[in-house]
Structure formats: structure tokens, C-alpha cells
Amino acid sequence: MYRKIEDFINDWTYEYQSTLKVFNNLTDESLTKKINENVRTAGRLAWHIITSIGEMAHRTGLTFKTVDSNSDIPTTVNEIVQVYKEASEKFII
């Protein structure tokens, strides 16, 4: 439970930076790899994380311009990182 908005922003910043490190360690080739037929590709999982930012925020009543979950998954890590940064920053502004 958060008592101050600042506490949430501090946690969000930590999680954002941690996820960004993971995304930055992906390669363009890894985005389409499947290690098992029953799991998402790294690209699909990254896209799910990105689109969930807006989806979850909207469920709480927060509204801001976000990524359309039906849009195509980016094909490069640079695009994924850029979209993730934008979505994350819009969430806490």
C-alpha cells in the first residue's frame, strides 16, 4: 500500500529501469524466437508489458495517450525500448 504518490513513483522508477535493462539486452533476432510452443516470443512478451501500462492505468481511472494493444509488434529492440520509455514516462507525468 502506498501512502504517498512519491513512494509509488520511486517504486515505478526502479521497476521501469530494471525492465529497461532487460529490454536493452534483447537482440532484434531474439524478438521472434520461441523457446517453447506454449510461450510468447520475447517480442510478444515485451509488447504485452508495454501495452499493459496503459491498460492497467485506465482500469484505475487514469487516462493518457497510450499504445494500442492491437498495433503491430515492433520488429527492433530500439523501437521496443523507445515505445516502452514513452509509455512509462507518460504514466507518471
Image (tube, grey):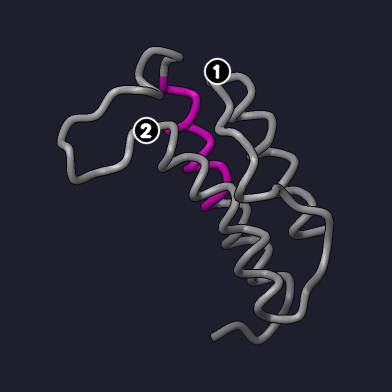
Q: Is residue 28 positioned above or below 2 on the image? A: above
Q: How many labels does the image show?
A: 2
Q: Nearer the viewer, residue 39 or 89?
A: 39
Quadrant, the C terminus: bottom right
Q: How crowded is mark 1: few (under 14 residues within 10 Å), some or many (20 or more)?
A: some
Q: What stretch is highlighted in magenta?
A: 15-26
Q: Does the magenta stretch include residue 71?
A: no
Q: Is residue 16 positioned above or below 80 on the image? A: below
81 vs 29, left or right, is right
Does the magenta stretch mainly form a helix, a strand or a loop?
Answer: helix
Q: What element carries label 2?
A: helix
Q: Is residue 33 positioned above or below 87 on the image? A: above
Rendering coords of residue 85 (x, y %): 69, 38
Which residue is at 56% across, 58% downward? 52
Rendering coords of residue 5 (x, y %): 73, 75
14 vs 33, left or right, is right
Which residue is most to the left?
Answer: 36
Tell me where residue 32 sits by quadrant: top left
**Alpha carbon separation for disc pair 2 and 1:** 11 Å
Q: Residues within 10 Å of mark 2 (few under 14, many from 20)?
A: many
Quadrant, the N terminus: bottom right
Which residue was labeled with disc 2?
42
Q: Which residue type does callout 2 highlight?
A: Ala
Does the CB distance between marks 2 and 1 fall below 8 Å? no
Tell me where residue 8 sits by quadrant: bottom right
Which residue is at 68% across, 29% downward? 82
Which residue is at 61% across, 50% downward? 69
Which residue is at 24% across, 29% downward? 34
Rendering coords of residue 42 (x, y %): 37, 33
Q: Which residue type does callout 1 highlight?
A: Thr
Which residue was labeled with disc 1?
76
The tag earlier along the polypeptide, 2 or 1, is 2
